[in-house]
Amino acid sequence: MAEETRRVIVHVGKKTYPVLTRLDNERFQSVLEIVRENLGEVDSSVDQEERLLLACFRLAYSMDAATRKLSQALKEC
């Protein structure tokens, strides 16, 4: 992680947002790609706020599923 905060302008869905980050560019772009991929799976006919919320739920579900798989794998070791 970089030390200094920087402002990055990102286009997500139908809007552009200013974002403050301490991530280096490579890590930030990697995270942004995950966000865009998840948002791309949500119906584009719904409004931006709902799309972002649904994408957030998709990400949370993915994290929960990964956590459960890791926990199960650790129990089997």
Image: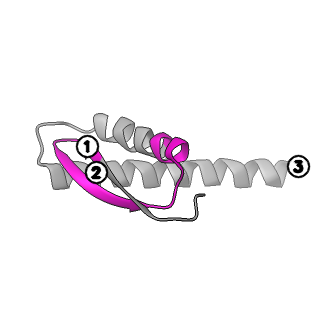
Local packing at callout 3 (Cα closer than 10 Å; few below 14, some 14-19, many 20+) is: few
Quadrant including the N terminus = bottom right
> Quadrant location of residue 32?
top left
* Quarter of the rendering containing residue 60: bottom left
Q: CA distance from mark 3 to mark 2?
A: 35 Å
In terms of secondary structure, where does tag 2 sit?
helix
Secondary structure found at label 1: strand
Residue sitting nearer the eye, 58 or 19 = 19
Using the numbered discs, state the Cα–Cα distance from disc 1 to disc 3 in whole angstroms. 43 Å
Three-letter code for the amino acid on which mark 1 is drawn: His
To which residue does mark 3 refer? 77
Of the two numbered discs 1 and 3 on the same chain, state the one appearing first in sequence.
Answer: 1
The residue tagged 1 is 11
**Residue 8, position in %: x, y?**
35, 52
Q: Viewed as shown, does residue 22 lie left or right of 32? A: right
Q: Position of residue 49 (x, y in %)?
A: 18, 55
Q: Earlier in the sequence, mark 3 or mark 2?
A: 2
Q: Answer left or right for 9 relative to 64.
A: left
